[in-house]
Each structure stands twice: as structure tokens, then as C-alpha cells.
Image (tube, rainbow, N blue to C red):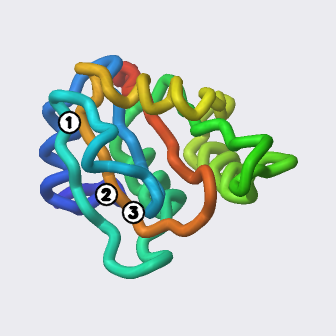
Amino acid sequence: MLKHQLIHPEINAVLGAAGHHGKVLIADGNYPASSKIGPNAKLVHLNLMPGVLTCNQVLQAVLSALPVEAINTMMYETTGQYALTEDPPVWADYRETMKAASLGLELEPIEKWAFYDAVATPDHILTIQTADQQRFANVLLTIGVRMD
């Protein structure tokens, strides 16, 4: 029986086989997961209905299961119809989740198109597609090294 919060068998199998520098994308409901994916990545759909599950809920589960050395978000647009003038509210939720997980990391935004490029690498091992409806809720984790 697993002791961490993440109990999804397929996700645990992928993470269990992953190594240092592997990338895990927790994608919001608007992310084009079928076309913006690394060549070695597994796609797991957890999008049951709008808003169920959220990226932050998945982040909580994943952080309970593996070491993380970097957390990147997709930088929000500052012009156009989807523009924001400040960080999306979900980023504050991520910071609280990271703090609760005792991570000494900062969220590091990546420009939108560079974010897509960062996902489409051979190190990308898993995309977890959620139904999160918040804008710019995508979060990319880089797996770290287990120290204990």
C-alpha cells in the first residue's frame, strides 16, 4: 500500500520509472495535450468535467510522491483577448501548495511559446490533463534527486 497521497496506478507507474530531469506537465483544460507533448511522454486524462480535477489538486498529489527541483508555469499573455495584468490567482494556490510540501523553490514562468518547446522535449515523460478552467494554470515539474 502506498503511503503518499498519489494513488493513481498509471501515474505512479510512469513516475516510478522516471529519473532525474524528467518533466511532468500538469495541464489545464485548455492545454493542447494531444499536439504539444514530448516524444516519450505518456498522456493521462483526468478531465472528468469542467473544473474536476484542478491542476492544484494534481500538484498536491504529485508533490507527495516525488522530489522536484524546478517548477515552471506558462507565462500569461499581457496583450490580446486572454491578457492578464497580474499573476493568475492559481499561482498563489501553487505557492501555498509548494510551501505545504516544504519546497524551497520559486515558481519560474516561461514565455508561452517557450513553454510549449520545453514540453516537447525527450525529457517530457508525462502529461496529466486536468479539467481546470483557470487561465494559465499549466505547471511543468522537473524531477529532482531523492536525498533520503
Question: To which quarter of the image does residue 120 belong?
Answer: top left
Mark 2 = which residue?
6
Question: To which quarter of the image does residue 143 belong?
Answer: top left
Label 2, label 1: how many angstroms apart (C-alpha)?
19 Å
Mark 2 surroundings: few (<14), some (14-19) or many (≥20) residues within 10 A: some
Mark 1 = which residue?
41
Q: Are marks 1 and 3 in contact (CB under 8 Å)?
A: no
Which of pointers 2 and 3 lies earlier in the amino acid sequence? 2
Which of pointers 1 and 3 lies earlier in the amino acid sequence? 1
Q: Is residue 19 above or below residue 140?
A: above
| Quadrant including the N terminus | bottom left
Mark 3 surroundings: few (<14), some (14-19) or many (≥20) residues within 10 A: many
Q: Residue at horizontal 38%, vertical 30%? A: 119
**Label ID, residue 130:** 3
Kind of residue at disc 3: Thr
Label 2, label 3: how many angstroms apart (C-alpha)?
15 Å
The location of residue 9, given as percent across then percent down, is: 14, 58
Element under label 3? loop
Question: Is residue 62 or residue 31 the one in the foreground?
Answer: 31
